[in-house]
Amino acid sequence: MFTGIVEELGEVTAVETLADASRFRLRGPVVTDGAKHGDSIAVNGVCLTVVDHEGDEFTADVMAETLNRSSLGALVPGSKVNLERPTAVGARLGGHIVQGHVDSVGTVVSREASENWEIVKVSLPADLARYVVEKGSITVDGVSLTVVDAGPDYFTVSLIPTTLALTTLGVKQPGDPVNLEVDVIAKYVERLLGTRSQSEEPTR
């Protein structure tokens, strides 16, 4: 489990295209400290498994399905990425519960700068709209954010200077893709209520 609090801004150093996957080599001195084969690291909100680790770089294989359901397929050597290790048991939950299972890809629609923050509007697939509410949580490229406004096909978030400086969201421009993961608690509630409704239907 992750919390959506990015630990460092890493960089893609190499991409190898395989038959039904891609192999990424990424640099991240913080997240590779103590890393070992089999560990999980979130890359732009996607939970990946470390298959090799040397110095401050690690290698991860990304299956075709993940490439199709996320924006990782657009990464090239030199691309900056948000990196986070799983949260430790007993550690503070600084953001919210993030699984690293991307639900869909949105697109940055607009950016509106003010003196101390920026309002960013992101497109939202219709099938995810019911999980996104004002003041609720959403993960954008691995960053835990609070929803400012939610519409039928969009939402907005407010980015503070720290987020702008320490994550890729500071450089995303209109038209750029971003990975979206809605709050998993909303999904569980929906499933629970649906199951309860079915169980309460009168039998004949």
Image (cartoon, helix red, strand yellow):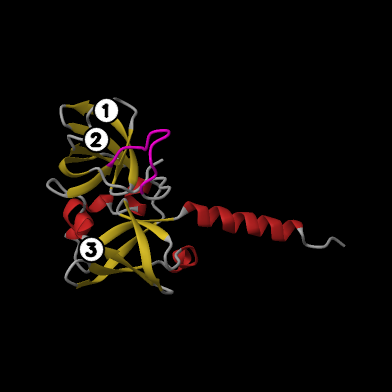
| Mark whose residue sits in front, 3 or 2 | 2
Give the amino acid at mark 3.
Answer: Asp
Mark 1 Cα shell of 10 Å, populated few (<14), some (14-19), many (≥20): many
Looking at the image, is mark 3 or mark 2 earlier in the sequence? 2
Q: Quadrant of the C terminus?
A: bottom right
Q: CA distance from mark 3 to mark 2?
A: 25 Å
Residue at x 22%, y 31% (from the top left corner): 32
Q: CA distance from mark 1 to mark 2?
A: 7 Å
Q: Are marks 1 and 3 in contact (CB under 8 Å)?
A: no
Q: Are marks 3 and 2 in contact (CB under 8 Å)?
A: no
Residue at x 43%, y 68% (from the top left corner): 134
Q: Secondary structure at mark 2?
A: loop
Mark 3 Cα shell of 10 Å, populated few (<14), some (14-19), many (≥20): some
| Mark whose residue sits in front, 1 or 3 | 1
Mainly helix, strand or loop, the magenta region?
loop
Residue at x 17%, y 34% (from the top left corner): 29
Residue at x 41%, y 74% (from the top left corner): 151
The part of the chain drawn in magenta is 84-94
The residue under label 1 is 35
Residue at the outermost right position: 204
Q: Is residue 91 magenta?
A: yes
Query: In the drawing, does residue 137 fall left or right of residue 159?
Result: right
Task: Determine which quarter of the picture holds residue 106.
Answer: bottom left
Q: Are marks 1 and 2 in contact (CB under 8 Å)?
A: yes
Q: Secondary structure at mark 1?
A: loop
Query: In the drawing, does residue 79 fall left or right of residue 194?
Result: left
The residue under label 2 is 31
Is residue 46 depicted above or below 32 in this figure? below
Q: Secondary structure at mark 3?
A: loop
The residue under label 3 is 176
Give the amino acid at mark 2.
Answer: Val
Q: CA distance from mark 1 to mark 3?
A: 31 Å
